[in-house]
Amino acid sequence: MPLNLADIRQEYSQHELSPEDCLPDPVAQFEVWLHEAVQAEVNEPTAMHVATVGADGRPSARIVLLKGVEDGQLVFYTNYQSRKGQALAAHPFAALTFFWPELERQVRIEGRVEKVAPDVSDTYFASRPYSSRLGAWASEQSQEIPAKSTLVKRAAMFGVKYPLHVPRPEHWGGFALLPDRVEFWQGRPSRLHDRVQYTLQDDGSWRRARLAP
């Protein structure tokens, strides 16, 4: 019997949200919700959907792990030569989405993206497990390969080259997104969900408003 997707639905009722409930700064509010997601032991609380637009104008999206919230910016790391790296070089803007179904919450964050300082990327890279550091050298991310064995051989090759200290490849590092629009979504009964949107004003302040679901 075919699956009827139209019949799949869930009623949300755990929490409420209003602009008055939210902190003045959206990144601070995000950190509160992220902390609550970690404390609730939701599955992959730092996983985020990252949407970019390539030089050809086509959007693309993928799941990436958030690795830091620093100076009001959200930081993640990748191969700069990957599809997302090339897209961000062409159009340095991205949209992030976090979804924590256990808490019936979603956060959408949009803004300009730039590379983090090389020393910041160096510090994070050095904190990664040895095998992950080798993987950054072995994987020519987003490029076609003839077989999985190609990756294994490249990892072994770089393991011989760097038996102890693995330097950060120049093509690998961090991106930081500086938000200019943030939306917090809290699931509510009867699809009358609570949505609070922050928009950055010309004077650097944030405007909060309730949106219709």
Image (tube, rainbow, N blue to C red):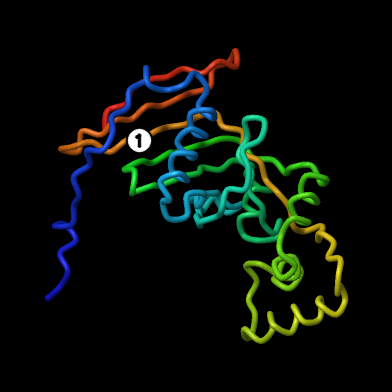
At 59% across and 40% down in the image, what residue appears?
A: 93
**Is residue 84 left or right of 43 when viewed as pictured?**
right
At 50% across and 44% down in the image, what residue appears?
A: 96
- Residue 7, position as x, y percentages in the image: 13, 57
Badge 1 crowding class, 10 Å Cα cut-off, few under 14, some 14 to 19, many 20 or more, is many
- Which residue is outermost to the top? 203
* Vertical relation: 83 (above or below) 90: below
The front one of 42 and 54 is 42
At 69% across and 84% down in the image, what residue appears?
A: 150
Q: Which amino acid lies under the numbered mark 1 shown in the image of this protein?
A: Trp
Q: Which residue is mark 1?
A: 185
**SS at mark 1 in the image:** strand
The front one of 13 and 1 is 13
Task: Name the quadrant containing residue 4.
Answer: bottom left
* Vertical relation: 151 (above or below) 114: below
- Residue 163, position as x, y percentages in the image: 86, 74
- Residue 33, position as x, y percentages in the image: 45, 36
At 16% across and 57% down in the image, what residue appears?
A: 6
- Quarter the N terminus occupies: bottom left
